[in-house]
Image (cartoon, rainbow, N blue to C red):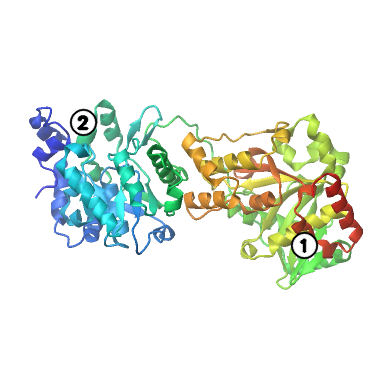
């Protein structure tokens, strides 16, 4: 039995209604649909749906790429609905069966005429023709009833709410689904079960979209042969976190509800770099050479250099950790190792200079706060800190590192004398998941500020890795500008290489849903980014200390990472933070003076 015969093909493409059934036969021959039928006939007797799908994909050389972690997001029991974009119009439904049926044998997909014809998959399909009105089609009415019954029995369902294959939209300049259809959305909304967004990366062939631009009938005619066109292709699939019923109930109006589900689905794809069929012209650039990092410094040499400075520059210890604030010019071995570890640590997250060592001219006159593990005899992490008044006296405003990335207007320049600049913060990989290193480094910064009461502000760049997609970076910027941005100071700060935020109204709704909760935007970024990348931890730390951002810049010398310029008024520091360092200060007058300043400024 053929998958597609001439009579049904004529009906599917509406050529029969147009009185041109013979044309359907000619088109079938031109599109080589005999190859589609041959593949189907070869494997149509497969005993199970999963075996059939595996055989077809192997025959075509199609590889499905998906994270094992994301597959675990599919519940092993209970009802849910998956919603997906529909870029292929056929093989995406087949792949959905492969992925979901392996975990849930009771999973079914609401399918169109073509997919329902595949007999080995028939038990996993609920047939609904998206090209017909439900009121006019008895088949559609039956399919909708079967759908509701399936959900009522607590079984999972897959849906492509667009109801038809994605097509090229001239106005948007990209391939995307049409508006998700109201009947499908009403089924989902009425079901009141968790909804899991699933995104398929890719699109049909250039010819498919070209024919579709000429006439929709030609697009439908080409659809079956697109299965063969996927030969030797990689199809990447993203699975998002389940959207709870409570989250869904925030959108009572069906239009807003549909936009929300579609947005959550396409957000998974926005975190991927997807090529367009009709791309803009880009000028290629020579890729920068990545140099091998220098060898580590002998730990004995590091320990000896540190011991020679201990009496003058030791600040405090905690368990096996020791914290030092070291002077420029007296730490050649330690600075070399700091520079090496910076480069290793930053490269691991898509940043870094790509040089053998991350050391620059600012290291020659900035101080270095070092966290040392005395038991392991190794550097745990470090900060570079610059005392604003000293820098202004020696070099003026151009002596600050952030000035290489941002230009400041004169009205805010006097502020720099009251500012300690922070930068090049890192914690080596093996200590990043431990609870104390970041806390101890921040404790060291707070102690430094309290011991130098002439300084009221911290300022510095916090980097957002270029490993993040442009979409996630845009969401982070939008979130910060809405909740944690100082517009009064920011109007005097100008990036040397600005980052262009590109978000639609629907995208901005994701930010609105996060409100001012850093943990919510953190979860959103984690959901979208492959590999569970999170909202930058240092940026989160600064925000929780009441810092504000005053600008964003792309740093071409640091692997095109996105830098946010942070400023923190120390008088806004939570008392909880101050209480954690009181014991280390050893001078009650210092604390009392600082608390009095907070009172005088109305900050307490």
Judge by depth and name the residue closer to the eye, 156 or 134.
Answer: 134
SS type, badge 1:
loop
Q: Earlier in the sequence, mark 1 or mark 2?
A: 2
Badge 2: residue crowd in 10 Å (few <14, some 14–19, many ≥20) = some
* On screen, residue 156 above or below 563: below
Nearer the observer: mark 1 or 2; the answer is: 1
Left or right of 185 on screen, residue 141 = left
The residue carrying mark 2 is: 217
Residue 125 position within the rendered picture, expressed as x and y whole percent measured from the top left: 22, 52
Query: To which quarter of the image does residue 49 belong?
Result: bottom left
Q: Answer whether residue 260 is visible to the viewer in this image.
A: yes
Judge by depth and name the residue closer to the eye, 203 or 102.
Answer: 102
Residue 336 position within the rendered picture, expressed as x and y whole percent measured from the top left: 73, 57
* On screen, residue 358 above or below 175: below
Q: Answer whether residue 353 is visible to the viewer in this image.
A: no
Left or right of 327 on screen, residue 423 = left
Badge 1: residue crowd in 10 Å (few <14, some 14–19, many ≥20) = few
- Residue at (16%, 32%) from the top-left corner? 14
How many numbered circles does the render carry?
A: 2
Residue 512 position within the rendered picture, expressed as x and y whole percent measured from the top left: 54, 41
Mark 1 and mark 2: Cα distance apart in space: 70 Å
Left or right of 34 on screen, residue 440 = right
The residue carrying mark 1 is: 580
- Residue at (40%, 36%) from the top-left corner? 276
Residue 521 position within the rendered picture, expressed as x and y whole percent measured from the top left: 55, 48
Judge by depth and name the residue closer to the eye, 138 or 536.
Answer: 138
* On screen, residue 328 above or below 114: below
Query: To which quarter of the image does residue 591 belong?
Result: bottom right
């Amino acid at each position: 039995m053929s998958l597609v015969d001439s009579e049904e093909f004529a009906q599917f493409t509406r050529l029969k209604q147009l009185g041109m059934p013979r044309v359907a036969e000619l088109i079938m021959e031109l599109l080589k649909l005999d190859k589609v039928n041959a593949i189907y006939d070869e494997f149509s007797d497969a005993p199970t749906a999963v075996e059939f799908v595996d055989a077809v994909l192997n025959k075509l050389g199609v590889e499905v790429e998906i994270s094992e972690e994301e597959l675990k997001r599919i519940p092993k029991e209970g009802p849910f609905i998956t919603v997906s974009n529909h870029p292929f119009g056929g093989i995406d439904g087949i792949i959905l069966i492969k992925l979901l049926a392996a975990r849930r044998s009771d999973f079914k997909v609401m399918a169109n005429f073509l997919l329902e014809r595949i007999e080995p998959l028939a038990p996993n399909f609920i047939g609904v023709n998206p090209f017909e009105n439900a009121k006019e089609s008895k088949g559609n009415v039956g399919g909708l009833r079967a759908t509701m019954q399936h959900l009522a029995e607590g079984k999972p369902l897959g849906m492509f709410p667009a109801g038809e294959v994605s097509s090229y939209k001239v106005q948007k300049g990209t391939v995307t689904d049409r508006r998700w259809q109201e009947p499908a959305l009403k089924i989902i909304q009425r079901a009141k079960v968790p909804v899991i967004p699933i995104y398929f990366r890719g699109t049909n062939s250039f010819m498919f979209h070209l024919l579709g631009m000429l006439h929709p009938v030609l697009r439908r005619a080409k659809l079956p042969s697109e299965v063969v066109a996927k030969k030797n292709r990689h199809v990447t699939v993203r699975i998002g976190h389940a959207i709870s019923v409570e989250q869904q109930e925030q959108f009572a109006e069906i239009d807003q509800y549909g936009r929300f589900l579609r947005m959550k689905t396409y957000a998974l794809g926005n975190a991927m770099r997807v090529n367009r069929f009709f791309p803009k012209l880009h000028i290629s650039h020579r890729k920068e050479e990545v140099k091998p990092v220098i060898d580590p410094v002998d730990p004995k040499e590091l320990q000896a250099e540190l011991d020679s400075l201990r009496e003058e520059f030791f600040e405090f210890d905690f368990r096996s950790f020791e914290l030092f604030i070291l002077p420029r010019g007296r730490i050649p071995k330690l600075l070399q190792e700091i520079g090496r570890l910076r480069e290793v640590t930053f490269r691991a997250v898509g940043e870094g200079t790509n040089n053998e060592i991350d050391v620059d001219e600012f290291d020659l006159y900035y101080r270095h706060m070092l966290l040392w593990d005395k038991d392991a005899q190794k550097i745990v992490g470090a900060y570079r800190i610059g005392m604003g008044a000293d820098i202004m006296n020696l070099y003026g405003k151009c002596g600050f590192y952030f000035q290489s990335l941002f230009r400041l207007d004169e009205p805010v320049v006097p502020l720099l004398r009251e500012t300690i600049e922070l930068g090049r913060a890192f914690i080596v990989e093996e200590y990043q998941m431990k609870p104390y290193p970041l806390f101890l480094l921040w404790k060291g910064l707070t102690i430094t500020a309290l011991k130098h009461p002439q300084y009221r502000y911290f300022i510095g760049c916090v980097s957002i890795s270029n490993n993040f997609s442009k979409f996630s970076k845009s969401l982070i910027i939008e979130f910060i500008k809405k909740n944690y941005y100082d517009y009064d100071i920011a109007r005097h700060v100008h990036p040397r290489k600005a980052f262009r935020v590109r978000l639609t109204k629907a995208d901005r709704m994701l930010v609105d849903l996060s409100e001012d909760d850093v943990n919510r935007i953190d979860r959103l970024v984690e959901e979208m980014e492959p590999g569970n990348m999170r909202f930058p931890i240092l940026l989160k730390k600064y925000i929780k200390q009441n810092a504000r951002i005053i600008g964003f810049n792309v740093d071409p010398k640091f692997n095109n990472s996105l830098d946010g310029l942070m400023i923190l008024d120390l008088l806004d520091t939570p008392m909880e933070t101050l209480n954690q360092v009181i014991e280390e200060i050893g001078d009650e007058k210092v604390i009392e003076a600082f608390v009095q300043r907070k009172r005088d400024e109305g900050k307490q």
